[in-house]
Amino acid sequence: MGGDSLDRSDRRMLLQACINGARSATEHPALSADAALSAADAARAVAAGATEIHVHPKDAAGRDSLAAADVGRWLRALRAACPEVPIGVTTGAWIEPDVERRLAAISEWTDLPDFASVNWHEAGADDVAELLLSRGVGVEAGIWDATGLEAWTQSPVRNRCTRVLIELPDEAVEVVRRHAEGLIAHVRIDEPNIPILLHGELRSAWPAFTLAVELELDSRIGLEDTLSLPDGRTAPDNATLVRTASGIAFAGRRDAAS
């Protein structure tokens, strides 16, 4: 859908749970390469306040996969555990660097996600997005840097994206605001009303989330982006991260209304 159909003033913050990412299951006790276990974890994150799920389907060896059998298995498990919750997947080029093989894998999907993230700094982003849209899958435009921003700005599918993901890297807290606001400003020049989901990773995860609350943007949190709570303690699971984020968002809305 085009961003011009949404009035941001009428929207509450969308909170997406990014439950695993490209992480190995060895990185945290709550991570699993088993679709059913991950789906149960996702359901707990939804109960804690998440409104969408972003997942990286895994193969039998626990690696990120675009194969139809793996994507289908994970989507079916998540939908059974989280009925009526939008589910999105990755199309990251690290899974399949060859663009034609990546497109071929996506074209073979029989179970379709509600949306998929496409990183615009990666080769083949326009073609991947076109294929997803032709199959009725929403596109999240992932923008990390100036290269991706420029490519998205010139993309023929720019105004057909569901939202823009402004994704901040692992960076010092003091540069998060400047980095985020610069990218946001450039996105707004070309698509003033498109929804923006702002998030970070590792050191920038919680500062980016707090900034998203302040700027009334959508955001996400989960074990893909950080293993830690704002005070530095290791989070026991995705639900705890989401519950903490929900508390920050509620406090932000309360402060804005007072």
Image: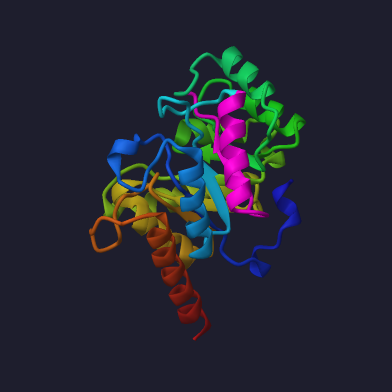
Residue 34 at least partly seen: yes
Q: Which residues are magenta?
A: 68-93
Picture coordinates of residue 167, whole percent (x, y): 45, 44
State the count of labels. 0
Please state if 94 lies on the left or on the right of 10 as rendered: left
Asked whether 199 or 214 is in front, the reply is 199
- From this view, report whether residue 250 is shown above or below residue 139: below
Residue at left 39%, top 55%?
208
Residue at left 46%, top 29%?
64
Q: Is residue 203 magenta?
A: no
Asked whether 29 or 155 is in front, the reply is 29
The image's colour scheme reads rainbow
Q: Is residue 81 magenta?
A: yes
Residue at left 31%, top 43%?
170
Picture coordinates of residue 197, whole percent (x, y): 53, 52
- From this view, report whether residue 136 is shown above or below residue 240: above
> Which image quarter: residue 237?
bottom left
Residue at left 34%, top 49%?
226
Residue at the far bottom: name it: 258
Picture coordinates of residue 218, whole percent (x, y): 54, 58
